[in-house]
């Protein structure tokens, strides 16, 4: 049965990605404002996308390489078509399009957001092996614990030794310790019965407060510890990991707690999220040309316009 709560989580994560890209130019580490708050709220978007993918794929009964290669073929088709389309529109005929296609998978070239697809391809290639390793009951706990320790060590090195994120020396595509953690975590949350987890009113209120104020803490760390405001360097933070778990459980339980209306709208918007992920950077680039970021409310206007146009284009496609 379809879980509409997870469809809503996909929409939430999709909006978070657009928030990340549309608000970063609206602040610097000297001044905290609405742009900074929105930006760091968007930090949870990418980890949640990996968790959602792991939730569904790692809990399939069978995961043969034939299925994996079919998924990879679908991703490569998207990457090839979009890069070739941009290559022709730009008339970049003196540039080898193959290099642009490969470059987009490691956050370079025409479509820097396609690094996410590059990471997924690598994870997909290992999925049958990973699924076999996770067959034993204790495997999830052991692997997740190892990946958590790696994340903590990296955070300690960043904080006490280098005073800057060492992740910056590794392209996002290849930060396997991070992406495998969130992916396997999603698989684990699919293995347990989330609906049996009891969320008291106190827990809901406490988590809501933590989620709302977490951008303030991330901004403080970015300014005083990392000296770098980019959200991608917080994905190894325990704060982000805990909030992501809370968000996932909260959304997964929505259907049981409230009656969701407009089911068809939720399913439709959920199906457009990948399209929005692909086109939003191009839409944002055009919108930002006509709106001045200097005004405090400009970020919100740019975000809303970019989201609406991106969903509209995705729907047409």
Image (cartoon, grey):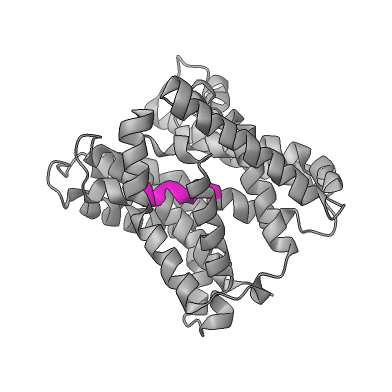
Q: Where is residue 194 drawn, in percent x and y?
A: 66, 70
Main SS of residues in magenta = helix
Left or right: 244 in relation to 91: right
Residue 266 magenta-drawn? Answer: no
Residue 45 magenta-drawn? Answer: yes
Left or right: 192 in relation to 113: right
Q: Quadrant of residue 153?
A: top right
Q: Is residue 109 visible?
A: no
At 37% from the left edge and 31% from the top edge, which residue is drawn? 225
Q: Looking at the picture, tell me which residue is in the foreground, 189 or 109.
A: 189
Left or right: 162 in relation to 134: left
At 22% from the left edge and 44% from the top edge, which residue is drawn? 32
Give the magenta range.
Answer: 40-47
At 47% from the left edge and 78% from the top edge, which residue is drawn? 201
Q: Where is residue 9 drawn, in percent x and y?
A: 51, 63
Left or right: 277 in relation to 29: right
């Amino acid at each position: 049965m379809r879980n509409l709560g997870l469809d809503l989580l996909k929409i939430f994560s999709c909006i978070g990605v657009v928030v990340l890209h549309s608000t970063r130019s609206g602040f610097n580490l000297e001044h905290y404002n609405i742009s900074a708050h929105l930006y760091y709220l968007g930090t949870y978007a990418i980890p949640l996308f990996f968790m959602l993918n792991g939730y569904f794929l790692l809990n399939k009964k069978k995961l043969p390489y034939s299925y994996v290669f079919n998924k990879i073929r679908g991703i490569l088709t998207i990457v090839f078509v979009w890069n070739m389309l941009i290559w022709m529109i730009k008339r970049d005929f003196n540039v080898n399009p193959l290099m642009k296609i490969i470059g987009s998978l490691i956050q370079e070239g025409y479509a820097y957001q396609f690094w996410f697809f590059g990471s997924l391809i690598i994870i997909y290639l290992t999925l049958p092996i990973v699924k076999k390793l996770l067959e034993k009951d204790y495997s999830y706990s052991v692997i997740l614990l190892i990946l958590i320790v790696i994340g903590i060590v990296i955070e300690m090195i960043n904080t006490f030794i280098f005073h800057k994120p060492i992740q910056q020396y590794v392209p996002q595509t290849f930060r396997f310790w991070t992406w495998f953690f969130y992916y396997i975590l999603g698989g684990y949350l699919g293995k347990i019965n989330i609906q049996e987890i009891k969320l008291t009113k106190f827990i809901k209120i406490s988590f809501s407060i933590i989620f709302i104020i977490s951008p303030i803490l991330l901004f403080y760390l970015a300014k005083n510890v990392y000296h770098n405001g980019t959200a991608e360097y917080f994905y190894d933070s325990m704060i982000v990991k805990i909030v992501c778990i809370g968000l996932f459980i909260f959304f997964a339980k929505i259907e049981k707690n409230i009656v969701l209306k407009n089911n068809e709208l939720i399913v439709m918007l959920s199906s457009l999220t990948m399209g929005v992920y692909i086109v939003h950077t191009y839409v944002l680039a055009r919108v930002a040309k006509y709106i001045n970021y200097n005004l405090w409310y400009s970020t919100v206007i740019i975000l809303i316009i970019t989201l609406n146009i991106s969903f509209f284009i995705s729907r047409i496609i």
